[in-house]
Amino acid sequence: MNILDCHDLTKIYPGQTTALDHINLSCADGKIIGLLGPNGSGKTTLVKLIQGLLTPTEGEVLIDGKKPGPETKAMVSYLPDLMSFDESMKIRDLFWLYQDFYADFDKSRAEDMIQKLQLDPSEKIKLLSKGNKEKVQLILCMARNARLYLLDEPIGGVDPATRDFILHTILSNYQRDKASILISTHLIADVENILDEAIIIQKGHIQLHESVETIREQYGCSVNEYFKEAFKCY
Ligand SMILES: Nc1ncnc2c1ncn2[C@@H]1O[C@H](COP(=O)(O)OP(=O)(O)OP(=O)(O)O)[C@@H](O)[C@H]1O
């Protein structure tokens, strides 16, 4: 069974912007997959369709064979591109909230990660820097024992050293035999070493879906170099 299948998946926003145009996609379970593409190519739209935050105009998306709904929300751990918490809450309050919300949330794992990142659990969210807010969100997301981690730009706002730490955090909290990760990002060079596969979207179409190894062999360059060449701006 694939963790993700898209059949003719199409999203046209009001105003007639076609964000995704009849995409067909199958992702095997147990992989870390990069969702790559230039600005406005449809990455966040795809992520939101998987999470059930948007409904397709046409076609369907299936997670482990199921349409997005309560059952898939229980197995998908979603990291949105924007912070969506009440900023007056403390980090510790969010742990309680997640524990109430998600049966698969491992509070002690979250506490351990917060400590390793030298964050104070009694700190209010609104007092955190942008990068530290991102860290807290990622910790909440990765502390769930999910089947699919859906990460929309998880390392955009943090410094390069923290990026490495976060990628390490993702890897060390992920059990390949039990879960998959779909990670949307522009920072290809930073993530490429942890990816098994790359999906490149362009103008709402899947331009490439290959294993990272195949891309390197076939094109004789890194995924980052391939991407830069394919989407060169003149
Ligand atoms: N709510 C919306 N209403 C109308 N058009 C939208 C909406 N959200 C996104 N779009 C359009 O859909 C297209 C795809 O946007 P999307 O945010 O999915 O791209 P993206 O690849 O995630 O971009 P980025 O890398 O810049 O975050 C763009 O043309 C965008 O302008």
Image: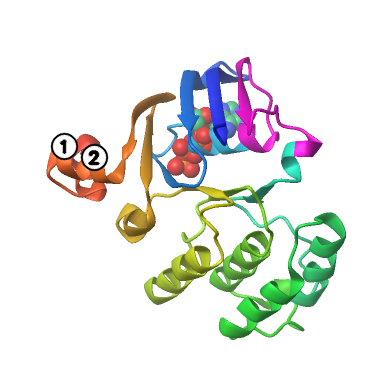
| Cβ of mark 1 under 8 A from ligand 1 | no
Q: Quadrant of residue 125?
A: bottom right
Say how many tags the image has. Answer: 2
Name the residue at the right extreme: 100
Model colouring: rainbow
Q: Which residues are magenta?
A: 49-71
Q: Residue at x 78, y 70 (%)?
A: 95
The relative height of residue 108 versus residue 140 in the rendered view (above or below) is below
Circles 1 and 2 in contact, beta carbons < 8 Å: yes
Which of 210/151 is in front? Answer: 210
Name the residue at the left extreme: 220
Q: Secondary structure at mark 1?
A: helix
Checking the image for residue 214, the label placed there is 2
The residue where tag 1 is placed is 218
Q: Quadrant of residue 90?
A: bottom right
The relative height of residue 102 versus residue 113 in the rendered view (above or below) is above
Q: Position of residue 173 (x, y in %)?
A: 56, 66
What kind of residue is marked 2? Thr
What kind of residue is marked 1? Gln
Q: Residue at x 52, y 41 (%)?
A: 29
In this rendering, does residue 38 appear at all?
A: no
**Along the horizontal axis of the image, is 71 left or right of 219?**
right
Q: Position of residue 142 (x, y in %)?
A: 62, 62
User: The N terminus appears in which quarter of the rendering?
Assistant: top right
